[in-house]
Amino acid sequence: MRATQTLGRLELQVGLRLTWLRDMAAAALAMRPPKQIDLAFVCVDAANTWTEFSRALIVSAVQGSQTTRGVLSRAAPPHLGRVPESIDAVLRQRNPRLLPMPPGGWPRREEPKWGSKDVLLAAATTLGISNLASVDAALSAGSRVLDDLPVVRNYYSHRNFGTERAVWNCLYQRGFPRGPHPDWYLHQTYGAIRQPLVNDWLDDLQLIVSLACQ
């Protein structure tokens, strides 16, 4: 996912991806029993989509981009227009003893963990982006999707007792009873959630992206 001159275009990129994931989830949920491998893919790809969006949002602001409200989103000097230096500043905010930035900037594997909402908010604050209030409002929308998805993604990437227990603990805080297996939660409805959990996550993710682009 690339940075854009208008955040509306970035929102559209995410929307198209989430629509595709909703269609995949709908097909998987229509099967009896639900096709767990496809639901797992939806969760992992949704988490990756958020990670890509988070980075693209910051880079777009550094390069200068128009929000969906028509306001210019940009970083405060001296970061404006300087992507490698901006990412270096975000890294140093979290680790002041970091070694000097290599020529050409940090490789992607060394960049901040963009999938974390705390990292996104810290980056937006450190760089002084002009739509910081919108990003803060998006991350404070009351949804747990940005807490839940990384835990579920980690489980599917590293299946073991520790990651399985982390999913149980995470969703227990959401009000779900202890299920027989982490896969079981993805097609469940419980309490105030009137649709399968995986669909609830996709809807919440779309809302957060929309708010952050304002």
Image (cartoon, grey):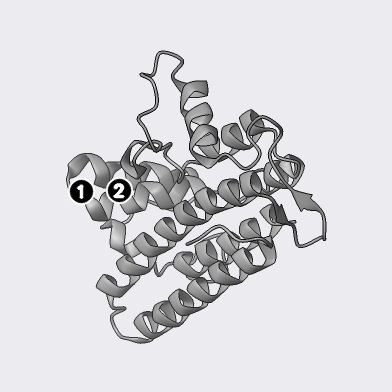
- Which disc number belongs to residue 154? 2
Picture quarter containing residue 102?
A: top left
Q: Are the residues tagged 2 and 1 within 8 Å (C-beta)? A: yes
Residue reaching furthest to the front: 103
Q: Nearer the viewer, residue 76 or 109?
A: 76
Q: Residue at x 68, y 50 (%)?
A: 64
Picture quarter containing residue 77?
A: top right
Tell me the SS state at disc 1. Answer: loop
Q: Quadrant of the C terminus?
A: bottom right
Q: Residues within 10 Å of mark 1 (few under 14, many from 20)?
A: few
Above-or-below relation of 167 to 1: above
Q: Residue at x 64, y 33 (%)?
A: 127
Q: Residue at x 38, y 20 (%)?
A: 100
Q: Position of residue 177 (x, y in %)?
A: 41, 52
Taking 165 as reference, is 187 left or right?
Answer: right
How far is the residue under mark 2 from the one under mark 1? 6 Å
Q: Amino acid at mark 2?
A: Asn
Q: Nearer the viewer, residue 78 or 51?
A: 78
Residue 64 at least partly seen: yes
Q: Position of residue 116 (x, y in %)?
A: 47, 41
Residue that numbered label 1 is attached to = 158
Tell me the SS state at disc 2. Answer: helix
Q: Position of residue 148 (x, y in %)?
A: 45, 49
Residue reaching furthest to the right: 70
Taking 9 as reference, is 83 left or right?
Answer: left
Residue 174 at least partly seen: no
Taking 189 as reference, is 213 left or right?
Answer: right
Q: Residue at x 28, y 80 (%)?
A: 33
Q: Nearer the viewer, residue 180 or 105?
A: 105
Q: Amino acid at mark 1?
A: His
Above-or-below relation of 23 to 47: below
Above-or-below relation of 106 to 18: above
